[in-house]
Amino acid sequence: MLSDVSPTEATSSFAARRVVARVGAARLVWVIVFTAFFLIGAAWSLAMPYDGPPDELQHVTRAYGVASGQIYAGPANSNVTTAESLVPRGAGCFRWNSMVSAKCQQNPGANQKAQHTRVSVGSGASGYDPSYYLLVGPVIKIWPTMKGIVLARLITDAEISALLASAVAIAWSGGRNRWLVAGIAVCATPVVVSLMGAVNPAGVEIGAAIAFWVSLLDLVGAGPVRRSSVALLLCSGALFAVTRGFGVGWLGATVVICVLGARRERLRALWRMRSVRLALSGLGCACAAACVWDFLAGPNIDLTGASTPHKTLQQVVAQELWHRLPSYLDGLVRNTYYYGGDIQVPQLVSQIWFGFAGLLVLGGLWLGSRRTRIQIAAAIGVSLAVLMITDVDALRQGIYFSQGRYALPLLVGAPLIGARELGRSSAVGAERATALLRLMAVAMLPIQLVVLWSSMLRFQSGYPASGKLPLDPFIGKWLPPLGPVAPIALMIIGLIVLGVFMWHPSRFDATMLRFVVVGALVYAIDIAALWALHAQAGLPLALATTLAFCCAFAANLGLNRIFTFRVSGPMGRQGARLLALSGVNYVTTLVIVVGLSHLWSDYLASKTIATAFNAVFNFVAYRRWVFEPVPDTPEPAPSVSPYIGRVIMRRRAVEESERAVSLDGRPD
């Protein structure tokens, strides 16, 4: 009964609903961020040729061997059992030769007989821990073709996307430490994203490292201990330890650096929690298993060499400082292949990325305590020192070994610690984090498309001897398995989803998710109609675009009205407004599709660009104008006693407050 509701009970109900809203919002954020990263990683999975990502052939053959029962294959460069189709004719012919496209290599599985013929080949990954290959190996064993390789890439993509989404959800739900979301955005460099679309455990290691850093920083901080952070600490830490050879070392350094900045009282409180002790026990078991495997398998590569050194130690040190160090830095951001020069990504990409990373790191150094400065310096110094030390003997033999991405598992801690300190400081507010995320969305997300575009150009056409770089990724001597449109379309859609989240990090609700789903469905209807009318029916491009646009209009109105925004109101008014907005969209679509047809012949890609251009503006217009909810007509107040009236008004006030709670659990 209404008379039984007390102000205390109403307040308790409101607080409980805030917690529920926060938990539900974090789950929604996880779904959205996972979808965005998975689409971006899927773009790389479909765009790259076999062995286009670094060392992919080595890891594919190792995965096939593990799936065939060859768990232990011996130390590095031992022979592994694999299908002959996975070592195709001309394998790696484009490596180190940027003028050659991937056409020189036979597609895996092109020879039907080779799919069922087993061979023994040397693999540099033969000594790697089998845990990663147990996950991706079965699909390669079933389909030893490009199909199996792409599926294995997508499995890797899903694993890394889940780790990054978990890290973002933890950071997002941490209130002022939403600055950590900006730190994660800096850590997800184009190099990291490109590894999401590769059969290579390096991407999983980096993704696990980012999640481990975020969960550990959250636990040693001043906020409440959350079970989600403890669970992520255990899962990401176990993957961090076992995925690659030096994982235990990186994990240990991460723990030491994080504990260095924690208070003793906090550490004692964590140790008294049973869930934390169980998680640490699980991490200890994972580290022990990784150490045992590394001892049995031996080092992945012999850095000492058997030949006489070609250079003196002084020459090596000079080369490390003046030549290799810039290469390491480029390898963190824009070198998605082996070393610089093979894929010509603009230098501006690294400059923009390091600008944002430097903003977080310098902010942490400026606003943080002495311990914070030591933490950041240790993360950077130890990372670079490990790269240089492991490269010294290799350089004396005349070869390069270390690459910048090798240090990312520890190096990502520097911007994350800096972001945490910015969130702690009273000098900068949470609104500054939102402004920074919006600036990152504008400046950094297009870079992901630029790097994918540049990589596709290199493998599809190669770089001509004339030095005149090709610009059209929709043509080439070699084309991706599903064509060049699919990777670019997936990348654009994923970047849009991620960009919308970064633009509205504190008010990202279920309506956006439904809008994305409906938009993808309407986009599929539009593309299918355009293809059928132009490619099959032979209609002119402008007329086919117009008719396809009309087909999508009806689906757009009905689905967004009923499913996305769930409004009633007069359908005629909504239809008229949508028609007016569609008129604007039609003009921009026609201009983009027909205009870009003069630059390249792929009209479907032009249509994708037009759709992406309209999507961001449409969400705001749909929500605030087209499907604006009609205010309810106030009902006449009932004739009741003053006491009952006060109770009713209090209940209505509580209900209004509950409706005003945003996704982060705070009232608007």
Image (cartoon, rainbow, N blue to C red):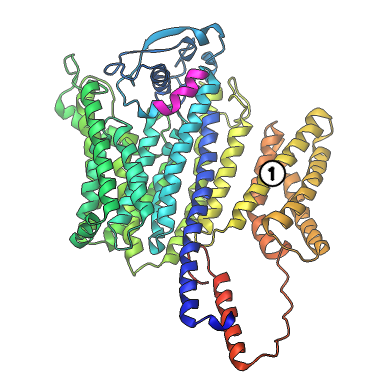
Where, by quadrant of the figure, is residue 403 drawn?
top left
**Dominant SS type (magenta):** helix
On the question of residue 462 being in view, the answer is: no
Residue 110 percent location from the top left of the image: 57, 12
Left or right of residue 371, residue 118 in this image:
right
Image location (x, y in percent) of residue 663: 51, 62
Q: Residue furthest bottom?
A: 642
Circle 1 sits on which residue? 521
Q: Nearer the viewer, residue 141 or 493?
A: 141
Q: Secondary structure at mark 1?
A: helix
Q: Residue at 73%, 81% (x, y): give it.
A: 635
> How many marks on residues?
1
- Please name whichever residue, 414 or 497, is drawn nearer the observer in this view of the structure: 497
Q: Quadrant of the N terminus?
A: bottom right
- In the visual, does 585 lie left or right of 7? right
Nearest to the observer: residue 312 or residue 538: 538
412 lies above or below 86: below
Q: Is residue 465 visible from the viewing direction of this image?
A: yes
Part of the protein shown in magenta: 134-142
> Quick check: is 606 in the magenta stretch?
no
Image quadrant where residue 272 sits: bottom left
Nearer the observer, 603 or 10: 10
Measured from the top left, where is residue 139 in percent x and y?
Answer: 50, 23
Give the x, y percent position of residue 658: 55, 71
Residue 140 is a magenta residue: yes
Q: Is residue 6 left or right of residue 644?
A: left
Q: Residue at x 26, y 31 (%)?
A: 290
